[in-house]
Image: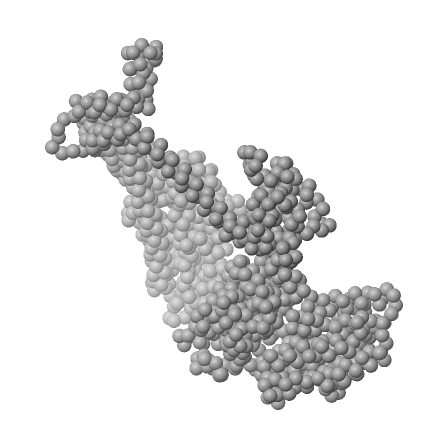
């Protein structure tokens, strides 16, 4: 502090300790407050004055704009009045003495003689400058007044033709060189149209009338055209205009000076303010609608004297400034008077405080008491005095408390010791292995969890090299070197995986992290090794890797792995020139078994079929389950006869197999399609298609048989199948033969139905309800899948809106086909349907599969993001079937993942499936996604899912798929 340093230096100088220093600059708090308050008040006065001035100018500008609009209306009204007067005059002329006969005669001389006596009075009294008579054939009979050639004549000729044709009067404003208001009216004598009269008058009356009404000056400016003769009127060269007319009192010199400063006439559109001979003028063009539609370039220029208003604004601003300055001076004087006494007391306290720094507590209190006075009301400075005295007492006590603080520090040391014991206990109960090693690599300590896991005690391992615990393989031959680098402080950390051999000879996979420790003595540990048990994680990883290639129900290759094996077999056959066969099995009546005895019976049948198929093929043959009730076998290096023989033997073996579930016996039966390679296909797609067609041939010939594919039936059979289903689908679309089934999905924690999955069915001609697998493949191949998508979306949105209008809220989950992401009409149809039916988009979830997003991931993500902006959400179906599921959950904007039913069916009886489902649930939850489990068919499975904190459950236990009339919301929809 400046004062403290000054006070201290003064005392030292008095004692002769230091030489005098140059006094430092000091500015009292009182003057700082006055200076700052002055600046703030000045800023307030200036701001207030500026804001007031700007407000007055804004009000003035608004009033001038309103006044300018009134000027435009007044000029329009004056021109209209001139036009009305001209038409009234035109109506009276045929009734003048002698005019009716002359007009009926159509003789030019008679018309001239008859009207000539009236021309001069009209010209003098009415201000008529031009008058023409035309007969009914548009020929001029007579005319008075002069018109420059090529100015009005061409226009008048066109007007005359129009009035003669329509027999209706008309008005025109023409401004080629000077503006004239014309009235063109038909001449009616004794009820007959004998011609047309044209009367023109300049806008002098308008100019004079405007001046009388508004008090402002006005000028009529006309831009000169190059093809017209020059006039003798006043010109403004910079604007390239002539002044056709102006107010009597108007000084034209003002416009010349403005034109010199503003040569661009368009820059005056908003108006300008100019000073002219100690006067303030506003100059602004006045644009009229009738002039805007005219081809002539003419407009009015209004000059308004605003001197009095400007002076009033300036006077008001000056008064505000003077009042503000007077108030500022008064405020500063008052503030100075108020602050002088308190700040003097505060200054005394400030210069007394340095005594505390030298422990002169009694002197400090004496100084404060000598300057203090009794006051009947305390203020903040009195409180500061009391606080400073109290502070001196406290500081005095602090010197007596040093010994106490020493004892307190000893107590803190005891607490630190307890904390160390707590940390040691924490290491023992932590679910990781914690080992400390000496500089030579021998184990020094082992925590309690490590003893439990590897079954060795700490005493048993003390002195044992750490490497002796590990089961080193070829990948870890550099580990001893790396560990030595950590112990010798050449590296800070080392991370690696290694198997540890437990006392019972079991092997556990451990993830190790070795860290260097700071040593203070030779006996201190040199390295800390922390091991995380990854055994169960590795098992789950192995299980996931196995599931990526295998069907979890039958343990056979899945479709993806089977296709890879088939592709390799086809490549080998092409390289070495041998042949083989593909057998495609489809179980007969499998859906009937599922529907009558449940999925448990279906699963048992599939397992039995897999065992029977494995028992009838060679070790070199490859068997896989392609999905549902479809199996396939690759027979390398065989002939057609050999493939047929295998098919016959396999069918015979299947016919012997049977299962009994719930008192019902079901026999296994299949239809087999046989395709040879490379004869019937040199790639996976063609060969599978050929075998598939052959299988359908076998089914049509009678279930439980086989059929060998032939090239002659390939195209014919495929076309027959596609055409058949194409006709059915088109008929169903046009005759509304599609039907919605709804399967409820329960919120597991609340145990209430949260939403429904919309499932599509087709009604056949005989009334049979067909599942999607019968018609969707054909729809995808024929392109009708888009029409089906559009129909499902529109009907679902319409039904949701109907339920919403009934006061209910039901959410729908709709499956989107893989082709939907290539449909440019999908998003517009969604938007139109939501708008048309006034449905809430948040009531809709769309289910997609990995296949749907696989073809074009960026396009799929873009479409999903646009649909989510509408308020909808997305579910990723078949989650966990392949490793790509984890990629898509991160790349796509999904909200819910639906765990594939193959992991749920046997969940209650399969520990492996439980581990896998828990892992999938943890992954989904880690990404912030909700989870749905399908194929929930019994209470035991539901209970396990509830413990795993699965969000939603779907399956026969929750509810079977049902039509709308069999649901809880059947009362709110039209059937």
x and y, in percent, of residue 426 in the image? 48, 49
Which picture quadrant has residue 677? bottom right
The answer to whether residue 853 is seen in the rendering is: no
Q: Residue at x 11, y 32 (%)?
A: 376
Q: Nearer the viewer, residue 437 or 171?
A: 437
Q: Residue at x 33, y 47 (%)?
A: 62
x and y, in percent, of residue 504 in the image? 63, 58
Which picture quadrant has residue 133? bottom left
x and y, in percent, of residue 253 in the image? 38, 35
> Looking at the picture, does residue 778 appear above or below residue 876?
below
Q: Nearer the viewer, residue 42 or 789?
A: 789
Q: Is residue 307 left or right of residue 337?
A: right
Q: Residue at x 23, y 31 (%)?
A: 390
x and y, in percent, of residue 651 in the image? 76, 83
Question: As drawn, which residue projects farthest toward the bottom?
Answer: 766
Q: Is residue 975 left or right of residue 618?
A: left
> Looking at the picture, does residue 811 appear above or below residue 764?
above
The answer to whether residue 432 is seen in the rendering is: yes
Which picture quadrant has residue 182? bottom left
> Looking at the picture, does residue 975 appear above or below residue 747?
below
Q: Nearer the viewer, residue 973 or 422?
A: 422
Q: Residue at x 80, y 74 (%)?
A: 618
**Quadrant housing the N terminus:** top left
């Amino acid at each position: 502090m400046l004062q403290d340093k000054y006070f201290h230096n003064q005392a030292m100088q008095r004692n002769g300790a230091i030489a005098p220093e140059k006094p430092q600059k000091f500015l009292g708090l009182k003057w700082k407050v006055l200076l700052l308050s002055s600046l703030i008040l000045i800023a307030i006065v200036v701001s207030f004055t500026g804001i007031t001035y700007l407000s007055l100018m804004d009000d003035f500008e608004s009033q001038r704009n309103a006044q300018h609009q009134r000027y435009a209306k007044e000029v329009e009204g004056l021109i209209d009045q001139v036009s009305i007067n001209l038409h009234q005059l035109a109506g009276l002329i045929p009734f003048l003495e002698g005019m009716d006969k002359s007009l009926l005669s159509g003789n030019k001389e008679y018309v001239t003689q008859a009207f000539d006596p009236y021309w001069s009075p009209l010209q003098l009294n009415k201000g008529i400058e031009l008058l023409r008579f035309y007969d009914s054939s548009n020929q001029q009979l007579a005319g008075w007044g002069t018109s420059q050639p090529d100015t009005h004549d061409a226009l008048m000729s066109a007007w005359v033709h129009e009035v003669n044709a329509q027999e209706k009067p008309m008005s025109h404003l023409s401004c080629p060189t000077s503006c004239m208001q014309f009235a063109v009216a038909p001449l009616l004598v004794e009820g007959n149209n004998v011609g047309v009269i044209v009367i023109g008058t300049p806008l002098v009356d308008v100019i004079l009338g405007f001046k009388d009404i508004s008090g402002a000056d006005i000028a009529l400016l006309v831009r000169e055209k190059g093809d017209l003769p020059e006039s003798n009127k006043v010109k403004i060269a910079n604007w390239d205009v002539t002044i056709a007319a102006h107010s009597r009192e108007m000084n034209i010199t003002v416009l010349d000076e403005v034109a010199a400063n503003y040569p661009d006439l368009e820059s005056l559109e908003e108006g300008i303010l100019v000073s002219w001979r100690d006067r303030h003028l506003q100059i602004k063009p006045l644009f009229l609608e009738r002039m805007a539609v005219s081809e002539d370039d003419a407009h009015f220029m209004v000059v308004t004297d605003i001197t009095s208003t400007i002076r009033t604004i300036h006077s008001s601003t000056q008064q505000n400034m003077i009042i503000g300055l007077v108030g500022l001076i008064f405020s500063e004087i008052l503030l100075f008077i108020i602050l002088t006494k308190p700040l003097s007391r505060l200054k005394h306290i400030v210069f007394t405080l340095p005594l505390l720094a030298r422990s002169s507590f009694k002197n400090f209190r004496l100084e404060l008491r000598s300057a203090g006075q009794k006051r009947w009301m305390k203020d903040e400075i009195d409180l500061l005095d009391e606080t400073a005295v109290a502070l001196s007492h406290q500081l005095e006590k602090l010197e007596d408390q040093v010994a106490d603080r020493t004892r307190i520090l000893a107590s803190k040391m005891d607490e630190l010791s307890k904390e160390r014991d707590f940390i040691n206990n924490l290491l023992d109960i932590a679910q990781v292995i914690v080992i400390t090693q000496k500089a030579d690599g021998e184990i020094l300590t082992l925590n309690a969890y490590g003893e439990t896991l590897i079954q060795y005690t700490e005493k048993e391992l003390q002195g044992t090299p750490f490497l002796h615990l590990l089961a080193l393989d070829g990948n870890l031959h550099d580990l001893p070197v790396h560990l030595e680098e950590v112990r010798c402080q050449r590296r800070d950390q080392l991370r690696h995986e290694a198997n540890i051999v437990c006392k019972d000879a079991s092997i556990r996979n451990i993830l190790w992290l070795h860290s260097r420790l700071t040593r203070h003595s030779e006996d201190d540990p040199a390295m800390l090794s922390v091991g995380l048990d990854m055994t169960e994680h590795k098992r789950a990883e192995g299980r996931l890797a196995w599931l990526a290639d295998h069907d979890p129900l039958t343990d056979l290759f899945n479709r993806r792995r089977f296709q890879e094996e088939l592709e390799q077999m086809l490549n080998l056959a092409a390289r070495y020139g041998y042949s083989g066969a593909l057998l495609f099995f489809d179980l007969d009546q499998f859906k009937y078994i599922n529907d009558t005895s449940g999925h448990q019976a279906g699963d048992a049948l599939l397992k039995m079929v897999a065992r029977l198929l494995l028992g009838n093929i060679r070790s070199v043959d490859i068997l896989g389950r392609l999905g549902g009730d479809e199996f396939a076998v690759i027979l390398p290096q065989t002939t057609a006869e050999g493939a047929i023989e295998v098919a016959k033997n396999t069918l015979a073996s299947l016919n012997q197999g049977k299962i009994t579930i719930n008192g019902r016996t079901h026999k296994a039966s299949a239809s087999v399609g046989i395709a040879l390679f490379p004869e019937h296909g040199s790639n996976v797609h063609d060969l599978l298609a050929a075998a598939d067609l052959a299988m359908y041939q076998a089914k049509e010939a009678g279930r439980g048989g086989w059929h060998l594919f032939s090239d002659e039936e390939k195209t014919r059979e495929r076309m027959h199948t596609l055409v058949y289903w194409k006709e059915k689908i088109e008929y169903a679309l046009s005759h509304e033969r599609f039907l919605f089934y709804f399967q409820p999905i329960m919120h597991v924690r609340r145990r209430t139905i949260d939403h429904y999955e919309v499932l599509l069915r087709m009604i056949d001609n005989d009334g049979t309800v067909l599942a999607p697998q019968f018609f969707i493949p054909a729809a995808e191949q024929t392109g009708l899948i888009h029409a089906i998508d559009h129909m499902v979306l529109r009907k679902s949105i319409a039904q949701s809106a109907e339920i919403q209008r009934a006061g209910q809220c039901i959410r729908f989950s709709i499956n989107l086909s893989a082709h939907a992401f290539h449909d440019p009409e999908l998003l517009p149809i969604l938007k139109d349907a939501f708008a048309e039916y006034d449905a809430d988009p948040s009531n809709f979830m769309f289910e997609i599969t990995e296949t749907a997003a696989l073809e074009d991931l960026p396009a799929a993500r873009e479409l999903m993001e646009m649909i989510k902006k509408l308020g909808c959400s997305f579910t990723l179906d078949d989650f966990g079937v392949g490793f790509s599921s984890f990629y898509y959950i991160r790349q796509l904007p999904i909200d819910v993942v639906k765990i594939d039913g193959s992991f749920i069916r046997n969940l209650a009886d399969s520990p492996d499936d439980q581990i896998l489902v828990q892992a999938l649930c943890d992954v989904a939850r880690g990404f912030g996604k909700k989870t749905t489990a399908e194929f929930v068919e019994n209470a035991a499975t539901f209970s396990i899912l509830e413990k795993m904190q699965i969000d939603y459950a779907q399956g026969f236990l929750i509810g079977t798929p049902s039509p709308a009339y069999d649901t809880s919301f059947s009362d709110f929809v039209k059937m």
